[in-house]
Image: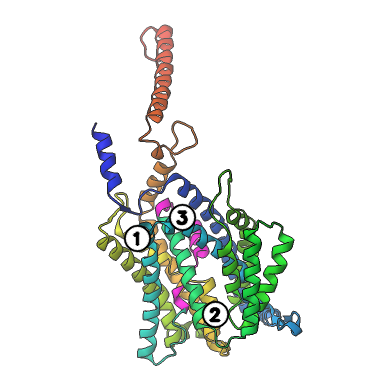
Amino acid sequence: MAAPARNRENASTRKVFGRLSLPERTFVADALRAETVGGVLLLLAAIAALLWANIPALHDSYESVSHYHLGPEALGLNLSIAHWAADGLLAIFFFVAGIELKRELVAGDLRDPKAAVLPVVAALCGMAAPALVYALTNVTGGGSLVGWAVPTATDIAFALAVLAVIGTSLPSALRAFLLTLAVVDDLFAILIIAVFFTDTIDFAALGGAVVGLLVFWLLLRKGVRGWYVYVPLALVVWGLMYNSGIHATIAGVAMGLMLRCHRHEGEDHSPGERIEHLVRPLSAGLAVPLFALFSAGVSLSGGVLGDVFAQPETLGVVLGLVVGKALGIFGGTWLTARFTRASLSDDLAWPDVFAVASLAGIGFTVSLLIGELAFDGDAVLTGEIKAAVLLGSLISAALATVLLKVRNTKYRKMCEDEERDDDLDGIPDIYEEDDPAYHLRMAGIYERKAAEHRRIAELMTAENGTGMPK
């Protein structure tokens, strides 16, 4: 009778980073697997960009390709390759981000206000603290405040690529927290881009984009299917949004949020889940790596790296990512746990939370984009800001690697417990401990094993007469 009482007690106590439900755990595992593959491609693209831009024999070709213009000038779309990557291809990335956000709002952790408090507060603190660190650095150093938003974004794909490279066995609850945190982070990054980096608005183009979005929504409501309908419409909406003066990636987010992400009766997957499954490889495998290829190619000579720590703007970015992100997310998580009377999971310690918070200091894709928007017109400072983003992300990755490796043995044990399936029914045993049928299955397995050992012992006894092997 003691065990059920203990289970009821545990159920009544809310744990921070407690065990995920089985459906949520499965979804998180699939999402993280896809993000990790995309992150590795992103990492390779960033390395290729740095090599291409820093090898003397190749540098000129990098500049030529990046600034080569193409597209219909009559439609206001005669853009450079780098510009197409930032405004065009990243719209696909933000489309997927919109679907992820919608899914979290209707079927994930953000659906439950009590569960949503932790990642929302942690994400807000994890964006406010880097902005504050940047501002303080530039106020005291006499720098420009326009880059305050650069260190506020977390790149989940790059963070997961780091986890894949260092081989740490981070528990699913911490991985889920990192994923949900990044979704909320993306939402506020989108709002920052829309609100703070829109100078002038062409209301005619904006009105056309809104009409296009309305048509998109009506077609979805009517159940119209076919890529040949939606893709041309999406291109028109994107083009109008670009010409309106609002960053064109907002069109991708808006269309992603319109998709239905809850399942109707008889559906294995919602339309949003199906489309995300189709589009995510295009986003992670092509759009984001190409953006990285044409955005991360900055000169990393000794002088540039030295200037990162000498100028308040670049120093603010580095400190914002390394110090602001870690302290903001850790502080937001601790305050949430403190004032909601939630306790940390028994298997984890607060240093684990700080390690994950340090990992969130990897701000690559969106940070590079915001850096280009914030310092548009100053090519030299834009390049130095990009170098600061790369350096800050590298330092955060190194710090998180050290902190996570210290606890990796503990994590590996937790992951083994999460994966153990002794009754071979395809469901981890940890989710079946309160099911009598599970214990009956296990009893049958042990009885068969005991019977087999008795048979072997009897054969050995009959052979040598002592029960002991010769």
Q: Is residue 4 magenta?
A: no
Q: Which mark is residue 353?
A: 1
Q: CA distance from mark 3 to mark 2?
A: 41 Å
- Residue 429 percent location from the top left of the image: 41, 37
Q: The magenta stretch spans which residues?
A: 150-173
Q: Quadrant of the C terminus?
A: top left
Crowding around mark 1 (Cα neighbors within 10 Å: few <14, some 14 to 19, many 20+) is many
- The colour scheme of the drawn protein is rainbow
Which of the two discs, 3 and 2, sits closer to the camera?
Answer: 3
In primary-sequence order, the first of circles 3 and 2 is: 3
Residue linked to disc 2: 300
Q: Secondary structure at mark 1?
A: helix
The residue positioned 64% from the left and 76% from the top of the image is: 209
In primary-sequence order, the first of circles 3 and 1 is: 3
Assess whether mark 1 and mark 3 are in contact (beta carbons under 8 angstroms). Answer: no
Indicate left or right for 89 with 24 as reference. right
Q: Is residue 158 magenta?
A: yes
Q: CA distance from mark 3 to mark 1?
A: 21 Å
Residue linked to disc 3: 108
Which of the two discs, 2 and 1, sits closer to the camera?
Answer: 1
Q: CA distance from mark 2 to mark 1?
A: 32 Å
Nearest to the observer: residue 209 or residue 321: 209
The residue positioned 37% from the left and 12% from the top of the image is: 467
The residue positioned 49% from the left and 47% from the top of the image is: 26
Quick one: which residue is furthest to the bottom in this view? Answer: 142
Indicate left or right for 129 with 367 as reference. left
Q: Main secondary structure of the magenta part?
A: helix
Identify the image quadrant of residue 422.
top left
Tally the marks: 3
- Residue 344 percent location from the top left of the image: 29, 55
Which of the two discs, 3 and 1, sits closer to the camera?
Answer: 3
Nearest to the observer: residue 355 or residue 283: 283
